[in-house]
Amino acid sequence: MRRLLYIIPVFLLLTSCMKTKDANPTPFNVPNGNFSGKFWTLHKNATTGKYDTTKKANLQLYISTSSGYKVTGDTATVHAGSYGDFAMDPNYIQFIDKTVAAGTGVVANKVHLNGVYQYYFDGSVVFQLQQAYSDTLVYQYDFRKQ
């Protein structure tokens, strides 16, 4: 019985320190609808340390929580047309491209909207994405709602 009296305070102390699930997660706006804009690949020059815009394309992005996303537009050379699902939190968005073969990340040497990106969405018009592919290569998207 005496041991029980010592165990109860220790148990209460341990359970009070346990992290509980946040009942009120941070709200954020999810982009929805048709967006158009530019895609750039930015390459860091090893000599100057500055980024050079090496390739760009005009793209359209349709995004919806019910049906996923679809990329169209100038998809002939630099960026691939694609579609798939996405998930996001207040800081990052992950695109799961259904046109990319598992494990490759690239089809026909074109960039796909695939993987995890940092994003900015103003809640209505501006939707920007950025992914550091390596320490010298960045993919950047600058979309506006149509």
Image (tube, rainbow, N blue to C red):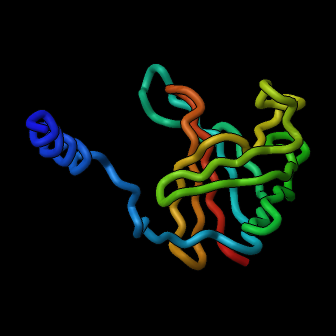
Q: Nearer the viewer, residue 73 or 30?
A: 30
Horizontal arrangement in the rendering, residue 19 relative to residue 109 (left or right): left
Question: Who's the residue at 28% across and 46% down the image?
Answer: 18
Q: Nearer the viewer, residue 4 or 38?
A: 4
Q: Position of residue 68 (x, y in %)?
A: 79, 60
Question: Who's the residue at 51% across and 72% down the image?
Answer: 122
- Residue 79, compared with residue 66, is above or below; it is above
Task: Please state the total of marks drawn on the protein image.
Answer: 0
Q: Nearer the viewer, residue 41 or 126?
A: 126
Q: Position of residue 77 (x, y in %)?
A: 86, 40
Q: Position of residue 53 (x, y in %)?
A: 61, 41
Q: Which image quadrant is residue 110 in?
A: top right
- Residue 68, compared with residue 138, is above or below; it is below
Question: Who's the residue at 73% across and 78% down the image?
Answer: 146
Look at the image and tell me in which quarter the N terminus lies.
top left
Q: Which image quadrant is residue 23 in?
A: bottom left
Q: Position of residue 73 (x, y in %)?
A: 86, 58
Horizontal arrangement in the rendering, residue 87 relative to residue 59 (left or right): left
Question: Who's the residue at 79% across and 25% down the image?
Answer: 104
